[in-house]
Image (cartoon, helix red, strand yellow):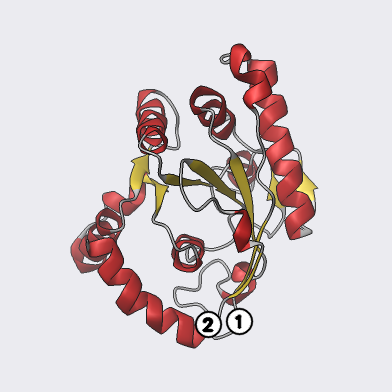
Amino acid sequence: MIYWVLKATLGSLLWVVYRPQVEGLEHVPEDGPAILASNHLAVTDSFFMPLVVKRRVTFIAKEEYFTGTGFKGWFVRTFMNAVGAIPVDRAGGDAASASLDTGKRVLSEGRLFGIYPEGTRSPDGRLYRGKTGVARLALQTGSPVVPVAMLNTGELQPIGRRIPRIGRVKIRFGPSLDFNRYRDLVGDRFIERAVTDEVMDALRALSGQDYVDEYAAKFKDKGK
């Protein structure tokens, strides 16, 4: 209920201010489960992409959004809980697996599940190697994967900027990808990598980004 209230109120304001320009929205199924796999250029990607989709989108969000302190921490945590975001420990391990299990539950209920295969925001606007969680979800649930390209949110909200500049947000949805031909190979790490790479190739074609065959988190660590 809170999700739809926020979408009607805050969403209406975002529509007026940022006038989203959307291509390919017809590729999002009107019913049934689907994984919306998006590149990640700005914090506001998690606002703008669900804004333009008629159905509810449930996202995985980094755990830090749920552990902040003070008023800002409370506000972000409340907002993320209100829109149904699911915390994920990006360090991996049992917490990450539990979050993917929750993703499977969302999909088993016939809903839309949003995920950033890169695992974190791009540090420089390029597209980085995808993590295989998206493949595991697709193979274990049989859900189609709809690639989503956020085209200019990184320009409107560069790293370090809290409030995005005023401008027209551009989003492009691509044709869904069906990986049911691999359903009997669930757990095969080579197949999971191949499926993930196919998703990332679709994102590269949609977004026009340069591709880096390295995990974004690893690239960020090298710069510290």
Q: Mark 1: few, some, or many residues within 10 Å (few <14, many ≥20)? A: some
Q: Is residue 48 left or right of residue 154?
A: left
Residue 13, how many percent across, how many down? 39, 83
Q: Is residue 98 left or right of residue 191?
A: left
Q: Amino acid at mark 1?
A: Arg
Q: Which mark is residue 18?
A: 2
Q: Amino acid at mark 2?
A: Tyr
Residue 101, how many percent across, how many down? 38, 28
- Relative to 216, residue 195 above or below: above
Q: Mark 2: few, some, or many residues within 10 Å (few <14, many ≥20)? A: some
Q: Is residue 76 visible?
A: yes
Mark 1 highlights which residue? 168
- Residue at image coords 39%, 56%: 56
Q: Residue 217's quadrant in the figure?
A: top right
**Circle 2 — which element?**
helix
Closest to the observer: 32 or 172? Answer: 32
- Residue at image coords 30%, 56%: 80
Q: Which mark is residue 211?
A: none
Residue 123, how many percent across, how many down? 62, 55
Closest to the observer: 67 or 42? Answer: 42
Q: Is residue 66 left or right of residue 35?
A: left
Quadrant assignment for the N terminus: bottom left
- Residue at image coords 31%, 78%: 9
Q: Is residue 129 visible?
A: no
**N-term-proximal mark, 1 vs 2:** 2
Closest to the observer: 14 or 184? Answer: 184
Answer whether labels 1 and 2 touch (C-beta < 8 Å): yes
**Circle 1 — which element?**
loop
